[in-house]
Amino acid sequence: MPRTLEGQITMEKTPSYFVTKEAPRRIYNMSRDTKLIVVVRNPVTRAISDYTQTLSKNPTIPSFQALAFKNISTGLIDTSWSAVRIGIYAKHLDNWLQYFPLSKFLFVSGERLVSDPAGEMGRVQDFLGLKRVVTDKHFYFNETKGFPCLKKPEGSSKPRCLGKSKGRPHPKIEVQVVQRLREFYRPFNMKFYQMTGQDFGWD
């Protein structure tokens, strides 16, 4: 990490930190004062989105159903598939709580980041001890992508929106497959709600 002067905040983001076993220890050894922001979304939607991303790069991969289940007739979920494993948030948080207290975490709802970006960004700014400068006047809803974008900053010719890889339409997944995944994640979600003191409303 670069050196940070008094009054500065240094930020870094990587989606894999939260699910990488060695990350909490390494970050703790670097700086135990680190504040951690974790964006989470419904793990079922997250898994389908993950699959959609992979499918766009490699159209020959097996179906979502074939990858998600070890045995489709018994409904046994394959937790070795990363798209499924990543959404077991309680398990990953357990690992982090061995090094950092809950007070060092802010859990941002991916769903609320879309429905109320300014509200979630307000929470982020409060957590970091910043003045609330990013407000709802900074966002507009992009109908094509289906999520909010930043209005164009001064001196820029166009608004800031997430790249082409975001907002892709998901493939159609059979209702019973989605239902089985919901059942699979439910106890993990409940544990995650208890651990964080936050109900994300995924059930």
Image: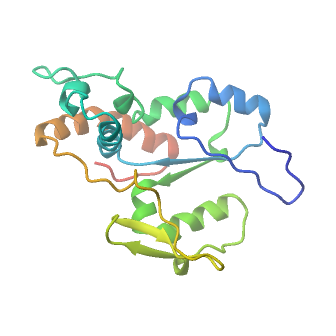
The quadrant in which residue 57 appears is: top left
Q: Is residue 52 left or right of residue 150?
A: left
Viewer-side residue, 100 vs 154: 154
**Residue 28, placed above or below residue 112:** above
Residue at the spot 77% in from the left edge and 42% down from the top edge? 33
Task: State the count of labels.
Answer: 0
Q: Is residue 31 left or right of residue 158?
A: right
| Residue lying farthest to the front in this orientation | 157
**Residue 137, placed above or below residue 37:** below
Residue 201 picture location, percent across and down: 34, 53
The quadrant in which residue 8 appears is: bottom right
Residue at the spot 40% in from the left edge and 48% down from the top edge? 41
Task: State the colouring used for the structure image.
Answer: rainbow
**Residue 99, placed above or below residue 11:** above
Residue at the spot 28% in from the left edge and 22% down from the top edge? 78
Residue 23 picture location, percent across and down: 63, 29
The quadrant in which residue 184 appears is: top left
Viewer-side residue, 147 vs 31: 147
| Residue lying farthest to the right in this orientation | 6
Q: Is residue 123 left or right of residue 75?
A: right
Residue 54 picture location, percent across and down: 34, 36
Viewer-side residue, 61 vs 115: 61
Residue at the spot 45% in from the left edge and 55% down from the top edge? 109
Q: Quadrant of the N terminus?
A: top right
Residue 67 picture location, percent across and down: 25, 26
